[in-house]
Amino acid sequence: MHGLFRWSSKWWPGVIPLVAFWAIAAWTSTSPLESDLAARSTAALKDTVLDKTRIAVAGRDVTFAADAFSEDGRRSAVASVEVVSGVRLVNDETRLVPEAKPFVWSAERDVVRVTLRGNAPLPASKGRLLEAARAGLGGVEARGRVSTMPRRCCSIRSEN
């Protein structure tokens, strides 16, 4: 038993600097790793149709929040973040955009401006509607108050 205490007195002073070096290395290398994972996760989502995308990285864990327009799109977006190399865990905070019922769209014209109101199925459609209004009306100002709410033609709901 006496030999164990003599042996531990030789390695114990080396543990303190080792822990200090480990803490410094963990503190300085975590930030570049997190920013790299966030950039690669964002790049993996470039072909997906999502709204209000937010990616937060803590260590190797990614918190992914977005508004999806279909369940398949939501699942494929989460799967594309999960396959990014270096990601350990994906906290899925995505949600489906509520369906617009009834699907309403209108255009109101004043003397100097046109205001578009209602729902658009996708964010790209919202932009195209505004561009078409600006191009079709010449010098009239076009403002959009269009929210993105999909119109699902084949949704199945169970009434409880």
Image (spheres, rainbow, N blue to C red):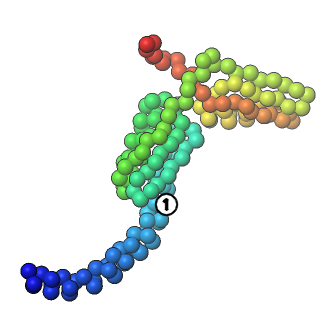
Q: Nearer the viewer, residue 24 or 94?
A: 24
Residue positioned 20% across, 87% down in the render: 10
Q: Is residue 119 above or below residue 47?
A: above
| SS label for mark 1 | helix
Q: Is 40 in front, or is 16?
A: 16
- Name the quarter where the C terminus is drawn: top left
Q: Residues within 10 Å of mark 1 (few under 14, many from 20)?
A: some
Q: Nearer the viewer, residue 44 or 33?
A: 33
Residue in view at x 38 percent, y 53 percent: 87
Residue 107 shows in the view? yes
- In which quarter of the view is residue 78 placed? top left
Please determine whether, in this image, residue 153 is positioned above or below residue 61.
Answer: above
110 and 25: which one is in front?
25
Residue at point 77%, 23% (across, down)? 107
Given the image, on which type of amino acid does mark 1 rest? Ser
Q: Which x, y percent locates residue 100? A: 60, 22
Q: Which residue is mark 1?
A: 35
- Where residue 4 appears, as percent x and y from the top left, is 12, 81
